[in-house]
Image (cartoon, rainbow, N blue to C red):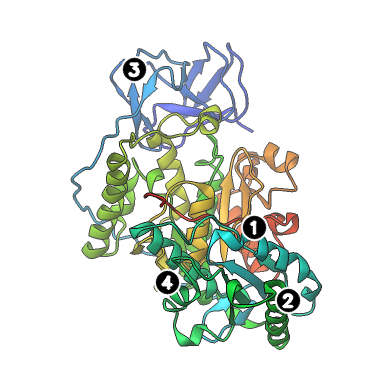
């Protein structure tokens, strides 16, 4: 394995592929420098002298501005590099007109639902309308574990703190996310569990659903029955009995929607795991499927790449609004737009938000952007979709599931055990993480640094995702990790 990698021909920096001590001589594309200090894995090395005030180029784009003179062989990081980003911007569309050649769809066994969508699991979900019944939902899930088996893959309760004491957009968002989850195709049966006096009660959620989405749904208002546990178990039993007749049948990749997410990223995420996910995304889209890219604040600094890939001017304008609306959200709260990356990201070698965003957007591959979805919106078009949601792992992954993703691909360089409401596939940026945290990690993209090709790894990830769609469990599922989080930006009554 090489000591460093230079990502694009015009880059001023290379990335260390292992910890390198001071005095190590390294070479990239004929340029040889000697390190004048220790450089951790994933961190940047100057390939030439960089003057104070000069833009620093990585991924072929500026990732910030040098705050002091940096010698060739110097460690480029937070003490000598700062962001060049600012608030709302005026953009211009420079259409790149990307195109993917169609490929015949691939198949997997799935569950065809009444509304025509396909689930990759046949689970019983308990969705509380309000945080007041979270413990009741979890008590029901524990008591109903005897229903698991046969055609019932699992019984899960999804607690959250909302559903009451909310106003405006927050209340609307909670209602929409809960309605989206109630009709998610991975659930063969759903118990919508209410209290009875909340703002976002059972009837309010039902009003956001279509009649053909109701057959898999049962409702329970706790204040209207003498024993909510007894009543809930009876309803869950009815749903399980109904699910017993559900069988997997041949489905194809035109029925598959996959969310794209990263968290706990390091300096290798944009070099290994995210490009492999991008290769997967292109393969799925070429076969008629859909992918969803979110984490809008982690597009800042790379947004023009996505804008230029929009298939038409209307989609471009929607992407501009997506970016600037999120910047206004920060500014309206009196918060810095660019308070990112996180401490863990920085420890892993990511210095500025541009650095993070240019790596993050590698997950989108090369496909054209087909649609832009609001928070709580659902996918209606095949191809690459952009979704409004923050970078927070739990909130963004829940939004992906609510948008219709049956699976979420989650790249990480530092590791995380969490899972969202749908199977969450962890993809390691480095092989050390994959070895140490095998109970967290489903796929090792670090093999790219050991000689495997991007195409072979993207093919392998595609095959793995189809296996998971067909029933193979992810590490987060095996560990029992299922989390739900809803976006909040307003007052609480």
For label 3, the crowd category at 10 Å Cα-Cα, with few meaning under 14, some 14 to 19 and many 20 or more, is some
Task: Tell me the number on the disc at residue 361.
Answer: none
Q: Earlier in the sequence, mark 4 or mark 3?
A: 3
Q: Earlier in the sequence, mark 3 or mark 2?
A: 3
Residue located beneath label 2 in the image:
230
- Foreground mark, 1 or 4, reads 1
Q: Is residue 368 above or below residue 276?
A: below
- Foreground mark, 1 or 2, reads 2
Q: Could you give the CA–CA distance between mark 4 and mark 2, rounded to whole angstroms?
A: 43 Å
Q: Tags 3 and 2 in contact by the CB under 8 Å rule?
A: no
Horizontal side of residue 26 vs 68, given as left or right:
right
Q: Could you give the CA–CA distance between mark 1 and mark 3, rounded to whole angstroms?
A: 43 Å
Horizontal side of residue 48 vs 275, given as left or right:
left
Q: Earlier in the sequence, mark 1 or mark 3?
A: 3
Q: Which one is nearer the viewer's eye here, 351 or 34? A: 351
Mark 4: which secondary structure?
A: loop
Task: Tell me the number on the disc at residue 67.
Answer: 3
Residue located beneath label 4 in the image:
382
Mark 2: which secondary structure?
A: helix
Residue 57: image x %, image y %? 36, 30
Residue located beneath label 1 in the image:
482
Q: Earlier in the sequence, mark 1 or mark 4?
A: 4
Q: Could you give the CA–CA distance between mark 3 and mark 2, rounded to whole angstroms?
A: 66 Å
Q: Could you give the CA–CA distance between mark 1 and mark 2, rounded to whole angstroms?
A: 25 Å
């Amino acid at each position: 394995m090489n000591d460093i990698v230079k990502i694009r021909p015009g880059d001023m920096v290379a990335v260390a592929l292992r910890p390198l001590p001071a005095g190590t001589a390294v070479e990239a594309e004929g340029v040889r420098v000697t390190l004048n200090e220790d450089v951790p894995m994933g961190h940047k090395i100057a390939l030439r002298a960089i003057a104070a005030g000069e833009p620093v180029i990585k991924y072929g784009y500026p990732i910030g501005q040098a705050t002091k003179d940096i010698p060739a062989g110097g460690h480029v990081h937070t003490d000598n590099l700062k962001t060049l980003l600012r608030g709302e911007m005026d953009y211009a569309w420079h259409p790149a007109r990307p195109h993917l050649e169609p490929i015949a769809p691939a198949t997997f066994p799935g569950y065809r639902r009444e509304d025509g969508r396909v689930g990759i699991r046949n689970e019983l979900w308990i969705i509380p309308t309000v945080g007041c019944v979270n413990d009741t939902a979890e008590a029901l899930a524990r008591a109903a574990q005897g229903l698991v088996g046969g055609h019932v893959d699992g019984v899960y309760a999804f607690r959250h703190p909302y559903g009451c004491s909310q106003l405006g957009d927050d209340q609307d968002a909670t209602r929409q996310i809960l309605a989206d989850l109630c009709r998610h195709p991975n659930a063969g049966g759903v118990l919508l569990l209410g209290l009875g006096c909340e703002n976002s009660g059972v009837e309010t959620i039902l009003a956001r659903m279509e009649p053909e989405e109701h057959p898999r749904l049962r409702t329970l208002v706790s204040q209207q029955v003498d024993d909510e546990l007894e009543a809930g178990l009876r309803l869950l039993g009815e749903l399980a009995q109904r699910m017993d007749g559900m069988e997997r049948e041949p489905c194809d990749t035109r029925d598959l929607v996959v969310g794209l997410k990263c968290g706990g990223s390091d300096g290798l995420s944009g070099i290994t795991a995210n490009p492999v996910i991008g290769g997967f995304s292109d393969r799925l889209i070429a076969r008629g499927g859909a992918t969803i890219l979110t984490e809008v604040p982690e597009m800042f600094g790379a947004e023009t790449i996505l804008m230029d890939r929009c298939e038409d001017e209307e989609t471009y304008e929607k992407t501009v609004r997506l970016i600037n609306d999120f910047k206004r959200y920060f500014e309206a709260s009196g918060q810095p737009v660019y308070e990112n990356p996180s401490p863990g990201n920085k420890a892993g070698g990511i210095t500025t938000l541009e650095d993070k965003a240019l790596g993050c957007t590698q997950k989108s591959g090369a496909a054209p952007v087909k649609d832009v979805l609001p928070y709580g919106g659902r996918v209606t078009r095949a191809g690459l979709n952009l979704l409004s949601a923050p970078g927070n792992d739990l909130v963004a992954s829940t939004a992906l599931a609510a948008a219709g993703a049956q699976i979420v691909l989650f790249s990480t360089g530092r590791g995380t055990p969490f899972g969202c409401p749908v199977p969450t596939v962890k993809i390691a940026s480095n092989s050390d993480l994959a070895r140490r945290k095998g109970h967290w990690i489903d796929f090792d993209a670090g093999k790219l640094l050991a000689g495997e090709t991007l195409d072979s790894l993207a093919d392998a990830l595609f095959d793995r995702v189809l296996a998971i769609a067909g029933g193979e469990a992810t590490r987060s599922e095996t560990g029992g990790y299922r989390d739900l989080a809803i976006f909040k930006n307003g007052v609480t009554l």
